[in-house]
Amino acid sequence: MQIKDCCYTLIVITALSSPSFHSQARNCIKGKPCGNGCIAKQKTCRIDGQTSTAPSSQANELVIRRTVLRLPKVYQITADEAYARKAPDSPVSTGYYKQGQRVFVYTTADGWARISNMQPEEWLELSKLQPVHPKTK
């Protein structure tokens, strides 16, 4: 009976003296730990006040920043026809839109709306557009 008690005591002591799994750093194969994940070795971790710096041999320090995603707004074409332009006030037409068509507007500037989030950019005159409001219940 004493051997059994000694084994239980040894197991309890071993369990209490070993570090918990949550306090150990994540094992990253190709990068380094950052928060609950891994990042590249040359990047800088800036989560929860941690700062692990990149090697000093690199002059340009790469930093991971969390940004807020801005969703585009939905607009509808109100003019009979609208020609998209390569840039605001540009004579080069990149597309044609009919009345009633809906487009995504990513940014507006000087009476123009950028309706393409990729290259080549497309711009429409803001006066030919009307915002579409979502239906409320």
Image (cartoon, helix red, strand yellow):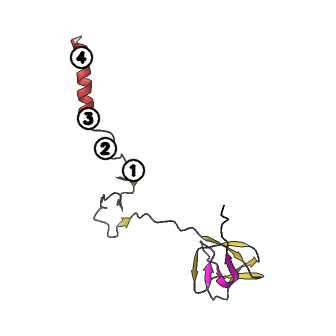
Mark 3 surroundings within 10 Å by alpha-carbon count, few (fewer than 14), some (14 through 19), many (20 or more): few
CA gap between label 3 and label 4 equals: 20 Å
Mark 2 surroundings within 10 Å by alpha-carbon count, few (fewer than 14), some (14 through 19), many (20 or more): few
Residue 132 counted in the magenta span: yes
In depth, the one of 44 and 101 nearer the eye is 101
Give the structural element (helix, strand or loop) at label 4: helix
Magenta residues? 112-137
CA gap between label 3 and label 1 equals: 22 Å
x 22%, y 18%: residue: 6
Among numbered discs 4 and 1, the one appearing first in the sequence? 4
**Residue 117, relative to residue 86: is it above or below?**
above
Quarter of the image with the C terminus in it: bottom right
Mark 4 surroundings within 10 Å by alpha-carbon count, few (fewer than 14), some (14 through 19), many (20 or more): few
Residue 79, horizontal then vertical, whole percent: 75, 82
Quarter of the image with the N terminus in it: top left
Say what amino acid the circle numbered 1 marks.
Answer: Asn
Residue of label 1: 36
In depth, the one of 20 and 131 nearer the eye is 131
Mark 1 surroundings within 10 Å by alpha-carbon count, few (fewer than 14), some (14 through 19), many (20 or more): few
Residue 111, horizontal then vertical, whole percent: 61, 86
Residue of label 4: 5
Say what amino acid the circle numbered 4 marks.
Answer: Asp
> Viewed as shown, does residue 70 lie left or right of 84?
left
Residue of label 2: 24
Among numbered discs 4 and 2, the one appearing first in the sequence? 4
Q: Spot the residue most to the top.
A: 1
Among numbered discs 3 and 2, the one appearing first in the sequence? 3
Give the structural element (helix, strand or loop) at label 1: loop
CA gap between label 4 and label 2 equals: 31 Å
Residue of label 3: 18
CA gap between label 2 and label 1 equals: 11 Å
Residue 42 counted in the magenta span: no
